[in-house]
Amino acid sequence: MTSIFGSRQVFVTRIALVLAVLPSAASSQTLAIRAQRVLTGTGQEILNGVIMIEDGKIKSVGPETPIQNGVPVVDYLDSTICPGFVEPHSALGVTESGDEIAHAVEPNARAADFYDPAHRQFREALASGITTAALAAGSMDVVGGLGIVVKTAGERDTIVRDGAFLKMSVTRDALSDSRVPTSPIGLMHVLRGELSKAQAATDSSPLHALVTGKLRALIDARSPGEIAQALEITAAYHLDVALVHADDGARVADDLKSAKVPAILGPYTFDTPKRLLLTPAALSKAGTPVAFTSDAPLYSPEFLRMTAALAVRHGLPLDEALRALTSVPAQILGVSDRVGSVATGRDADLCVWSGHPVDLRSRLQAAYIKGTRVFRQQAGE
Amino acid sequence: MRHNLLRCAPLFLGALVFLFATAALHARPQRAPEEHPLAIKGARLLLGNGSVIENGTVVMSGGKIQDLGADIKIPPTATIIDGAGKIVTPGFIDARSALLLDPSSIAVSGSDAVRSTADAINRFARNEIKEALENGVTTVALAPTQGTGIAGRGAVVKLKGERAELLKDAAFLAINLEPWLDIKPVNALREFLETKRAFEEARKYREQWQTYEQDLEEYVKKVKELEEKEKAEKAKEEKPKTEEKAGEKKEEKKDDKSEPEKKDKKEGDKREPPPKRSPFAWTLQAAAQAAGEHAEPLASSADEWWFDEPKPAGADEKKAEGGEKKDEKLKKPEMPAKDEGKEILLKALDRKLSVFFGAQRAEAIQNALDLAKDLRLRAVIAGGENAHRLKGAIAEADVPVILGPVVRSEAPPASCYRGHDAGAAATLARAKVRLVLASAGDDPLETRFLPLSCAAAVGHGIGPADALSLITARAAEVLGVQDRVGTLAKGKDADLLVFSSDPLSAGAVPATVIVDGQVVVQR
């Protein structure tokens, strides 16, 4: 304990010396953050954790790691650090409606085209602990378009992965009176038609990438019937898929497990029926990876955490709930090499909480993106 | 023989159903034939008012807490629950809930102080009751929370296993100051002015009655004097004629007495008393009064239409006759009509009935504070979305705030939610406002997650040690039921929760829920 938690004054003096000597020390390229507890997002809990950050990336994380002389240290000795949350399905920062409802199939529409990185909603998301968010296009379409994964703050390089997934829907939201499909049966017909066409095609369109397994789809499917349809399409065309809003999926938990399809669940509110609140625990127990969404800004980004808290209240283990906010959505979006966990090589996107992040009594004290602090709780708030 | 029995069967069934229906709401306390006391031993007792007893024991019997403390004697016949490692709290109280209320009872239109929420409770909402109890909510306060104007009287209800029981009827007067659905705020203002007027009219009504009672006293006195005078005169003269005259006068007096009672007099009505009305005209008028409008023209035109016969001339002439015959001073005062609604408003004016103002916007809250000050009401702000902006005025007026919802799922800027601040609870607490947290939901299911609201309030600045009191002791005080519930104390109802971890921590749900000394939930 003495090597780290004593001789603080000595460290400070040495830092001052180093800063005086090095020319570009002001960019704080190396940083050590210490916390009472670090939750890695992959199930590990490290007490007296030390996170070494270099050039915005996590160099190492471990208990009581000795810190080199001259490295600036930030202490959160009463706090818990976890990865910044990854929101897998949102319309944050979307300035115009992201739905081209005139046509049900819009594979080339891109969420990247209509979001404003400076939008206030990103700030609100960050204040709720969300450092990475996926923006999905076309929730009212059968094939809505390509989604993009972005950071919720940062001076530059905020795009994590463009074209990360193709948004699709087999729900009633994708039906319309003014264009095809107008009915669920019509929807399946349209979908099969498009996918079969794409199989025969040779171009590099998103649908062709989808049917050749190069692009993942996020399919909105709510009721057990819709989930079954989505799974059927997935099997028939050998798609790589995750389901969104599969809250009524407890009854088809085994089918989801055998199809190896992850589920994005939520958002849950205070008037959500108990049956749906039990789904995360049921699916997780059956072996399906589970992630949470707040559907921000349709719901407040605060409800990402609330959804997790409600799931825990209804049987989901606490550490699974944290994974559902971090590493699982990162995996679904194909960005787990960059975000979603506190591990060597990942971006230093960290949130500092006064307690466990899924415990509603905890408050966000600070947030870092790529090693730079982008949020600090105001005193007296 | 069998034929008769069959005939009796529906009657018998009907009687059973009737018994069930009445038992459901007003159950007599059930006593097991040999009731053993129940005790929880060696637990951490959070009393609800901030006090803690470590390694404490609670002894319950007869539905009440008989004793509690660190080193108390447990009766030998008691069933003992091991409290080691457990935390015991009072049952949670939701001071503004939509549980057991049908959507049509949550939203009411028009002002009517007589409306009683206790009449609108859905006693068969077993699933709602069960989910609330599973999450530790044992008592709820119910009132129409939507619609604008005087919504009626709220009720406090206790959740007992499968049914709900009235804890306190007519516990408060609910007045809603928020626009509802597509009603514009300017119309909400108009409703507020109507509310003000309703109080004014209640005052006038009281003055009217006071005047009447004074006049009646005077009249009775004068009649007595007159009678004594006449007796004396009679005794002097001893003439039968005088007796007859006196008898006549007495009869006339009797007629005069009965007539005003039949007539329905409106306040400030200086005209001649209207003729005998049809029962329908009375209903129209009562409905009009309840709506706070002057329906006078409507009633009388309906009257004229209803009755083809001419107005009986007798009434006016008799009155005139009576006036002529007797002394002017002996004109019997007209009894004003009894108005239950106004009686209720007078109770509020006398500070015998709390007034819960449903107010979210800052203007609405200010209106409530002003009205409370002018009329010296025992006011409470319910909802209080923007109360944190008026914290100084509210603290100074010593008006409690029932705050809810603490967190909103809808993202801003939905118009009513402008000004929502998750830190509002902490802001109000720091300003020393008397604070209570409630679910304040539109949906019955929202009550069950009251503890989550409380936890979220801690996450936004409420001190962890104070948080529990905001959904237990403080709630009971504001609702006026603190003699029964809200804290773990000797003599209070045995409503308590047993937790295996901090009650507000992630995933914490009560392992055991006890209401009136009976275990209603056991995980």
Image: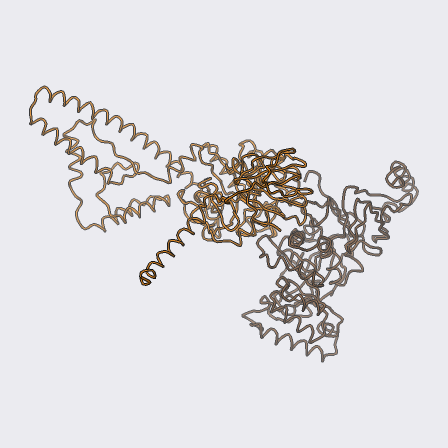
Would residue A181 appear left or right of A358 to someone viewing this image?
Answer: left
Residue A328 image point, x, y percent? 74, 59
Report whether B511 appears left or right of A165. Answer: left
Of all chains in the rendering, the one displayed in brown is A
The orange one among the chains is B
User: x and y percent of residue B267 in the render?
Assistant: 30, 37
Q: Residue at x 51, y 49 (%)?
A: B98
Q: In this view, does B67 lie to the left or right of A134?
A: left
- Front-most of residues B60 and A247: B60
Residue B407 in the image: above or below residue B397? below
> On the picture, is A43 further left or further right than B181?
right
Residue B303's spot in the image, x, y percent? Answer: 24, 48
Q: Nearer the viewer, residue B49 or A354?
A: B49
Q: Residue B15: horizontal and vertical position, in percent?
A: 37, 53
Which residue reaches farthest bottom?
A: A200
Residue occupying image coordinates x 8% and y 21% = B237
Viewer-closest of A104 and B395: B395
